[in-house]
Image (cartoon, rainbow, N blue to C red):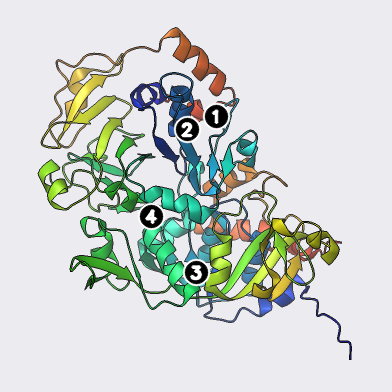
Amino acid sequence: MAAVLARDIPDESFALCGMHGEIGLAACLLAQRRQAPNLWFQLDGGGIINPRLPQVPHTVNDWRLADGAEAIVSGLSGMWNLTRPRLTFEFFGGLQIDRYGNLNLLEVPGLRGPGGAAGLAAARYRFTYCYLHRHDVRTFVPAVEHVTAPGNLGGSAERRAAGLLGGGPRLVVSPLGVFDFDAAGAMRVVSIHPGVDPAAVGARSGFPLDATAAPLTPHLDDEERAILAELDRDSALSAALPEAR
Amino acid sequence: VTAARRSKVVPLAQAVATIPTGARVAFGGNVNNNVALAGVRELIRQGRSGCTLIAFGQGLGADLLIGAGVVDVVHTNYIGMEHLGLAPCFRRAAGDGSIRVVDWDSLGMIMALQAAASGVPLAAVPAGIETTTWPTRSPDIYRRVVDPFSGAETFVVPPLRIDVAVLYASAADPFGNARHRGFVFWDELLAQAADRVIIVCEEVLPNEEIRAAAGQTTIPGYLVEHVVASPGAAAPGGAPPEYAADNAHLERYCAQARTADGFTAYLEQFVSEADRRDQASGR
């Protein structure tokens, strides 16, 4: 999961790794050591910028991460990085995602979530990545109950008409595969992970997702495998989710 | 005439006793780091109720206050246990309606705290809010107005007032000048937005030590009403670099507090029993 996102991260950008952002953090570290040496990234409200990490920790709010970092900005200063559309992207999780990449972190029937946090920033980001720890019809829904991080709203045209900045959701990664969005802003399959039944993707989604002709998500190359093994020495990635690597 | 400068150092119980029933209370830090949990435990031991909690990115502390019935209104953008999952009491109480939750997004809440700190009557939030759930979810705090400069529709939030902010710091001098050796998070903003500030710190330093490195003072003493020394005040959460969160404890809490009985047993074991340690006056 981290490697898939890492490969996509553009150089000369600024990433926010929010709470529970271990996967995004691993992706940033991996990208920085490969195609994106000019990537900047910030760890949540602690405001640590460009840490030099021997391994991914279990939480991004860990002061050991300050060792060798390039800056530590205040919570408030870090907050304004959420509103800079030219550079910034963020990794978002959610209780639900819908066909147009809108995310819900607030609540679903019978389950009160933690709250919407900084999802509004998705209205201004250069783009967003979404990682979902589950892939089933309750998580991949036709329309989310609450939009806490706007994606393409009812489609790309609606996002444009609403005047939102940035490009909206760029990639979605789930335990089943990798997804992006077509010109109309609807989710489509990029690849499925090795070992996943193509029919399961459609069956476990609440809206059409056709994976029958989808390629497999490329395996890690040797360098990715070596770097990720090194970063996962504390097993934070493996703990975050088994298919994280 | 030479008057002595007044020390603000008081025992924990005395500082917390100044938080009245029904007060609007905020704790600082972030989720399970730099939260003055000794203050949370003392509020519970004193049996406070009817409070409104301003919870910007909070974890165990907010969950304990909710589970113990100290608060009945919660303003929040996030209450959870980060990588350990959901906050069990918050989830239960928000689900069964035993507390009223006012849902904010992070940027709106920050703007509202800045409004409280700076005295402006309202604050505009970034465009795009109209595409989210917030204006319909929380119509009392997100209101539509016409921007007099551009003529565009925009949303504003009211000041988010705090009666008492209880903030963790690594150290402070007797006059309230506080220092964070690690993360500061949003504590400076909370201190400015609150009418009164209680600093709960690991140790009280002589004023000369603060003077020797004034640039390290994060919260100046003129904002602070009381200073409390309570070593380990942020435990079992973390206060890096002093100490890390006790993950095993937090995981056990998440499992145990899933039932009301389990939560009650936790309070008996870890809140009542921590009394002596929390009150320790340090050096």
Q: Chain of mark 3?
A: B
Residue shown at 79%/61% (left/top)? Answer: B210
Which of B37/A224 is in front? A224
Q: Nearer the viewer, mark 3 or mark 1?
A: 1
For marks 1 and 2, give the CA distance.
7 Å
For marks 3 and 1, give the CA distance.
33 Å
Q: Residue B118 vs residue B191: left or right?
A: left
In the image, farthest residue toward the front: B149
CA neighbours of label 2 inside 10 A, class few (<14), some (14 to 19), many (20+): many
For marks 2 and 3, give the CA distance.
31 Å
Picture quarter with the N terminus of chain A: top left
* Residue at disc 4, secondary structure: loop
Q: Chain of mark 4?
A: A
Name the residue type under label 2. Leu
Q: Chain of mark 1?
A: A
Instruction: Please give the residue where the numbered disc 1 appears in the rendered image.
Output: A56
Q: Cβ–Cβ below 8 Å for labels 1 and 2?
A: yes
Instruction: Please give the residue where the numbered disc 4 appears in the rendered image.
Output: A115
* Residue at disc 3, secondary structure: strand
For marks 1 and 4, give the CA distance.
25 Å
Which of A175/A226 is in front? A226
Disc on the earlier residue, 4 or 2: 2
Picture quarter with the C terminus of chain A: top left
Instruction: Please give the residue where the numbered disc 3 appears in the rendered image.
Output: B53
Would residue B170 be seen by someone viewing this image from the given angle?
Answer: no
Which mark identifies residue A25? Answer: 2
